[in-house]
Amino acid sequence: MADKLIIFDTTLRDGEQSPGASMTRDEKLRIARQLERLKVDVIEAGFAASSNGDFEAVQLIANTIKDSTVCSLSRANDRDISRAAEALKGANNPRIHTFIATSALHMEKKLRMTPDQVFEQAKQSVRFARNMVSDIEFSPEDGYRSDMDFLCRVIEAVIAEGASTINVPDTVGYAIPELYGEFIKTLRERIPNSDKAIWSVHCHNDLGMAVANSLAGVKIGGARQVECTINGLGERAGNCSLEEIVMAVKTRKDYFGLEMGIDARHILAASRMVSQTTGFVVQPNKAVVGANAFAHASGIHQDGVLKARDTYEIMRAEDVGWTANKIVLGKLSGRNAFKQRLQELGVQMESESEVNAAFARFKELADRKSEIFDEDILALVSEENVTHDKEQFAFVSLSQHSETGERPHASIVFTVAGLEVKGSSEGNGPVDASLKAIEAHVKSGAEMVLYSVNAISGSTESQGEVTVRLQNSGRVVNGVGSDPDIVVASAKAYLSALNKLQSKADRVAAQG
Ligand code: KIV
Ligand code: ZN
């Protein structure tokens, strides 16, 4: 039987560290469920000690997810490790992932610790964690830029203390595939007890090589765990992308010879869910999940694909969850057809009342838009378009007027803590006027650092999906809204971002 490659997803931890990508507890749970459907082996659910919100999210995911291992990150200290263990109490398979920086630069400038102090702290922390949970992963942060002799000394010691997975991060995305692969190989060859642990790769994408580096770590270095995120979400240029790793290892099984437990048919739904939740739009030419990934525009390619699909296709679109971009439902479709389509799309509703609420939103949309595509349904059920009672701001209605030669004007009705308020304003355009009308009432003082509109299903009849990124007092949040009317979608996105700014989320940075 072929070796197994463990897929460790860190969308909810390292992915979420991306400025603006922070998610609520419920959004994280929803994504964790999708990751479980995808059959990822390990879900890094968060960094329990970083904030109460993260603790609760890890706890909720640990109590809910049954098939995947649930992991919490923790710095190498007793308090962080105890918080992680506490949050993971309800998990079937808990893992504590503890880390400390080992590069000379990080030890001296960031930690202000000597190598001997770091060595002792790494050892003590793994020993402490091992008394609480049997599955311990250790990461030497900035491992790839660390001194080889020192790294060997630290890793040998933590394996002796019981760390069963050793993860070697390229924290700053500095590696080159061949060199990174050799680095892992050398570590494994030089450390006497290296066979007692599973070796893992964790690559950032600053030079666009996170996937290539990870694959080299697997092929040359012999790593058997890859840490990755959906859509490659992550700080700066992001992390290694899960969908690319999975499809590379699957498509080139002849070369890698590895098995995975992943059910790739759920990849696209996971990609959409993460992009709609975080507002990080997927570029059209992104491998596997981009809108053009399986589109054959040129006549030559189309002709080839029609004659024999493997002339230009190395993967089948349906194997990663793409279905034909067809009209799936319309105004006359009933609740059962709607529910069945949700199931086919891999969307799981918590209760019948949630299905009813989503069906009501579907009917409302079908009244305004004759053709409803899968993308519309996915947007409709994304958390962002569901108004929760607990939310501070919610959209009610909007009217706006724009005419050539006149300054556009908008009036908007929305709720603040359940009470309706009305705001009006002029602006440079209808979107500007609408958002100024909200701001005139809310007075958040937030700075808009990004505004983007994307057509969900490609044509002008499609729904517009708007992302608004706001920054206030050092916090950055993204709000997403969708509607056939992009002015309404913009107002929804703005209110959603304001809701996120309202929620308290002071947290300790993982690399802090
Ligand atoms: O990139 C990194 O070094 C990390 C560690 C905390 C594992 O994310
Ligand atoms: Zn990282």
Image (cartoon, rainbow, N blue to C red):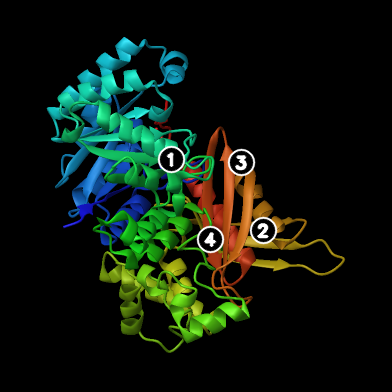
**Label 4: how many residues lie within 10 Å, few (<14), some (14-19) or many (20+)?**
many
Q: What residue type is disc 1 on? A: Glu
Quadrant of the image occupied by residue 39: bottom left
Task: Write down the residue under mark 2.
Answer: 434
Amino acid type indicated by mark 4? Gly
Compare marks 3 and 2 and give the one earlier in the sequence: 2
- Dot 1, crowdedness within 10 Å: few (<14), some or many (≥20)? some
Residue 197: image x %, image y %? 19, 35
Do labels 1 and 4 touch, CB within 8 Å? no
> Who is closer to the viewer here, 431 or 156?
156
| Quadrant occupied by the C terminus | top left
Number of numbered tags placed on the structure image: 4
Q: Quadrant of the N terminus?
A: bottom left
Separation of residues labelled 1 and 4 (CA atoms): 43 Å
Residue 85 is left or right of residue 400, and the answer is left
| Label at residue 59 | none
Badge nearest the viewer, 2 or 1: 1
The residue wearing badge 4 is 481
Task: Look at the picture and state if 15 lies above or below 191.
Answer: below
Depth check: 150 or 311 in front?
311
Give percent across and percent down for residue 24: 39, 48
Which is nearer the N-term, disc 1 or disc 4?
1
Instruction: Provide the secondary structure element on which disc 3 rests.
Output: loop
Q: CA distance from mark 4 to mark 2?
A: 14 Å
Disc 4 or disc 2, which is closer to the eye?
4
Mark 2–mark 1 CB contact (< 8 Å): no
